[in-house]
Image (spheres, rainbow, N blue to C red):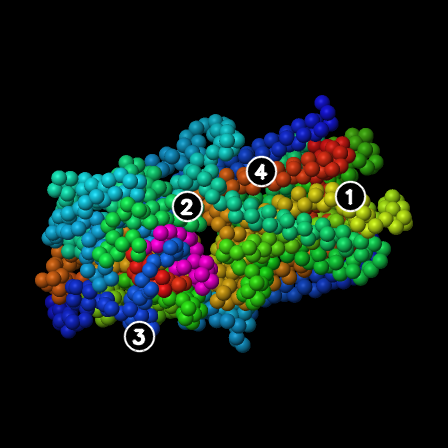
Amino acid sequence: MTNWGRFILRRLIRVVVVSLVLLTATFAAVRLVPGDPAQKIIGMTTDRTPAEQAKALARAHRDLHLDRPLVVQYFENLRDGMTFDFGRSFQTNQEVRSVIGDRIGSTLRLAAGGTIVMLVVGVPLGVIIGALTNGRRRWLETVFSGLSGFIGSIPPYVVAVVGIYFFVNMWSIFPRIPDGSLLDDVLPSLVLGVGPAFLLARVVRIDTLDVLNQDYVRTARSKWLSVRRLYGRDVLPNVLTPALTIAGVLFASLLGGAVVVEGIFGRNGLGSTLINAVQIGDYPLVSAISLLFGFAVVVVNTVVDLTLAAIDPRTMVAT
Amino acid sequence: MTRRKRSRIRAFAGTPTGIAGLVLLGVLVVVAAIGPSVWGDKATATDYLHLYSPTTGSHFLGTDGSGRDLFARTLVGTRLSLLLATGSVAIASVLGVLLGAGVASVGGRVQRIGATVIDTWLGFPSILLSVLVITVLERGAGAAMIAVGLSFAPFFARLTLTSAAAVASQDFVSAGRLLGLSRRRLTTRYVLSNIIDQLVVAIFSTFGQCLIAISALSFLGLGVQPLVGAQERFSIDWGVLLDQGVKNFSAAPAGALGPAFAIAIAGLAFGWFGDGLARIFNPRLTLRRLTPRVEPTRQTQTESAT
Amino acid sequence: MPRPTRLVALLLCFSLLAVSCGGDDSAKTPSGSNGTSGTTSKEITGVGPKGSGAAPAAVTIAIRLDIDSFDPTTSLGDFGSQQAFLFLYDTMVRRDLDGKIVPNAATSWEVTPSKGVFHIRDGLTCADGTPLDAIAVAKSYHRFGTDPGSLGRTRVFGPEGMKSVVGDNVAKTVTIETNSPNNDMLTGLANTGYIVCPSGMDDTDKLKETPAGSGPYKLVSETRGDEYRLELRSDYASFPEGTTAADLPKKVTLKVITNDATAADLVSKGTIDIAGIQSTDARKLQADTSLVAVPAQGYGSNAVLFMQKAGAATADVKLRQGLSMLMDSEQGGAAETQGMGTSRRTLFTPNVDCYDPKAAANAPKYDPAAAATFLDAAGYKKGADGKRTKPDGSKLRLNVVGNNTQGQIPQFIADSLEKGGFDVNLFVGTYSESIVKLLQDQYDLGSFPFTDSTPLPSLWFNQIGTGTGANFGQISNKEFDELSKQALSTDPTTDPSGRCTTWQKAEKSVLSNANVLPMDQPTNYWFGHGVTFNSRFFKIDPFSIRSK
């Protein structure tokens, strides 16, 4: 088998193993609920007569496989996870799959917007500050490290509140709730992306410094290579590798941030659906959405690893 | 030892952010201690005929939907926010260290599986993990504390595991093993005593993040639930205040800014303080503090463990 | 009841005859009051200004709560569901703004207090194209009368329920018979008697997710929890007199916006066309003269609900009375409506038949000091921990449930009781959550929106009559049941004062027994961006939407 084949196989095995851990965790979570989790369904739907409630309860038992022995339950649950069939929502009786289909769009938009801001702001910022602080301007280094640490540590929901105060209430630049204009996604994307962007920029800056101090770059510089060629051909590709690594990891926190700020920006995405489902105990939705988020993180990290390997095959050796 | 201590204090004093963090922390602790008794009455006095008042002389941040003073409520909320963060850090660190040490001491295949579980756990967005835990427990302040504790535990487990691996490769441990000391004994004796420094730094770095996570849960309605009457003043935390503030943002915007700044400042204070500590223990840890959940080296650590 | 009291009540009613004992509710709704400016009484009728006459091509309407189910018979939903049903389902008859009953699925009818014969319109069709004949209509009403989950069944069939519903395809009639007289049958049919088409009757589980509509609009697509897109049916014919398909918007979108501030923001920008605001956010919009304001008051008061389920501490009338004395409707009303409604301590509001302002005296008076004495005497003395105990000395904890769509009223209730010396546990959740808690768990009291969109006192029977569809607190007051039955069998045209006297006695019984404690009458401040329309408190009339 080629190096690539082996590498991809190992990555896929890891995706499978991690997915199994996730499935097991969500399975355990619902079974750890004291009492009969399906009991929650009573009163949640409009079924109010004893006969109707019994029917709904039986349906919930069937959907969650609670009527089977625990081991069977577990495997049925695994099968459900693989086919992504989680039965129906306790509350609306809608298929969980179709709820997710309805809601995933706005969550993806937020996450994509945030990721774009993170990359588009973070990488150039890091390279520029790196170039500016290469052995010079200690003050800029101090200011940048203080500022980026500060911005990077503020949670997105706080950034959102401050952002809305200024950009919506005070200056009316962006809409808070989507109103169909092109500016709809700007503010939430900035809110989600700005923190990770600065964290990314910190890493990129250090990598930029590393690259700039490599012998071959010094040589290139001494030969008065054009700045564009220097940064385009030498610095950027070398910085991109670690940048992608950390961006993949930052994606997880970005996704978590999206869950929290969805409500603030009036989005009806998976995050607000999940929160509502947790509040009322709509377990089919809770398991499906948490699983989906977990899976998204794993997939993104795997894609990042594969991309890294394509850019720089040396990373394959490490694994 | 005293010389080491003195030099550490000097190192700490050399970090302006560390000093600033310490001062801010001091202020926060004082406010937390005296908050409910000093501003408690003002924070809970309802006046339904004057609700959603904007900023005025007597109400610095305006009033909420029950006519209660929001500035007083933000101050009073300091105590619960800090207490819950403390609780979750305690849970996270104790559980994490025990788990990490446990996994480290078994070795072999089990250790690898344990490491995989810890890394999966670590990679999962913490807010989602907390939400999943709250699904199991009855909603409330305690549940939120446990949930955040559980979602930050793998950070400490990973730290312990990594340190254990580093220590295990050192000569004196090999020597100990040659002398017939058991793996468990070696772990407890050498590893734990060697990670105390890092642990202290990690606890303070995590503190701010736990506070932010707890507030996020309250903000989403999954954390602190309001008590009533005389107990109400002990059920105010910044997350709940922020949630209410955001809901009434157009009526009284200042109400949301108060708790938002409180959360940001507390997060910053703990971060700076942790930064200062990190510098005196190990200058190389500085960068790690700022990206602990997203530590770039983590991926490769995972691989080396598997 | 002792004699003198009854005499007083009678006298009272005579003196108020002209104002509030009138059976014909058309007296309540000022006719021809087109215009938003002017006196307060005009402002709250829910009648919008006259528009240009043409209908906008498409409108987007904000709904405060999501549609819980498309089954109009069993839906527990409030704002969203009720608004959707009005677009999607037809009723037997309609009730116009003046309170007059006008044709819908039935073109004419003969009604006695316990029987109604309805002549069904020719050529009725369902949204899916299937014909809707008399038998299909009868089947729908039969289910409405017999389904144990049917929420509004007493509105149509009265206190004793349905006797029979018979459809005749030859004579094209539907005959409804009730077990006891119900003079409010027509209004009940207009308000809650939605006709579900055969496809929905075959599978009532599916009906929850897919409407089986008979109304002017059909559901084209939806994103649950977010928006519902409706389209005017081309084959619909049961328009109110003087209205044609050209007068209605071709497309209607119902958009779920739970936050009032958000809805206010979007309607002022014109992102949505119509929104009902109940919070202080309405004030900002009121100042905006480019918007059409159509405020509408609710009928009946929102009230604190005392559960009388087995095991609830509030099953004891003394405790209920004592607790009522701890709660101030002035502050409570402001807490619930953010000061945008009107505080009330009567069940019936001035816009409801048989309103009597003096009825407030029947409710326990707000007086914390007297409450303390009263509760002590009733055995709810303070224990060693300073908290009041049950009469047998065991610990008492009052469980309060409320939802976050009703301002701060749950917190207000809890605060008031705490100050009165009780150990209180408070649960505040979303609307659906609080309904779940009400139905599922043991609670003692809570806030509940009792307001309806018809000006008839019988609305209360459906909510607190023993065993009725919407009696979530399992309230039981035999005297109220008896009096309601009597009032419903009294013909408002022949004996208007007798009817009102009986309703007022029924109201008095509920108030003095502290089954519920009225707090406030809410106002829904509707705003249109470039459109005008009429509203009935929490829903707008689909046939009244016109360009400004």
The disc label shown at residue C39, or none: 3
Q: Position of residue C334 (x, y in %)?
A: 38, 68
Residue for badge 4: A295
* Co-location on one chain, circles 4 and 3: no
Mark 4 burial class by Cα count in 10 Å: few <14, some 14-19, many 20+: some
Q: Amino acid at mark 4?
A: Phe
- Furthest residue to the top? A1
**Marks 2 and 3: same chain?**
yes
Tell me the SS state at disc 3.
loop
Residue at image coords 69%, 58%: A150
Q: Position of residue C293 (x, y in %)?
A: 37, 67
Q: CA distance from mark 4 to mark 3?
A: 61 Å
Q: Residue at x 74, y 37 (%)?
A: A311
Q: Amino acid at mark 2?
A: Glu
**Separation of residues labelled 2 and 1 (CA atoms):** 48 Å
The residue beneath circle 2 is C222
Q: Residues within 10 Å of mark 2 (few under 14, many from 20)?
A: some
Which label sits in the foreground, 2 or 4? 2
- In this orientation, which residue lies closer to the viewer: A171 or B37? A171
Q: CA distance from mark 2 to mark 3?
A: 41 Å
Q: Amino acid at mark 3?
A: Thr
Residue A104 image position (x, y, % from top left): 51, 44
Residue drawn 36% across the image and 61% down it: C547
Dividing the picture into quadrants, the one containing residue B123 is top right
In the foreground, C142 or B85: C142
Q: Position of residue C273 (x, y in %)?
A: 41, 59
Q: On the image, numbered disc 1 is attached to which residue? A: A238
Would you say C402 lies left or right of B17 here? left
Q: Give the residues drawn in magenta, as a range.
A: C248-275
Q: Is residue C234 above or below residue C530?
A: above
- Which comes before the other along the chain, label 2 or label 3? 3
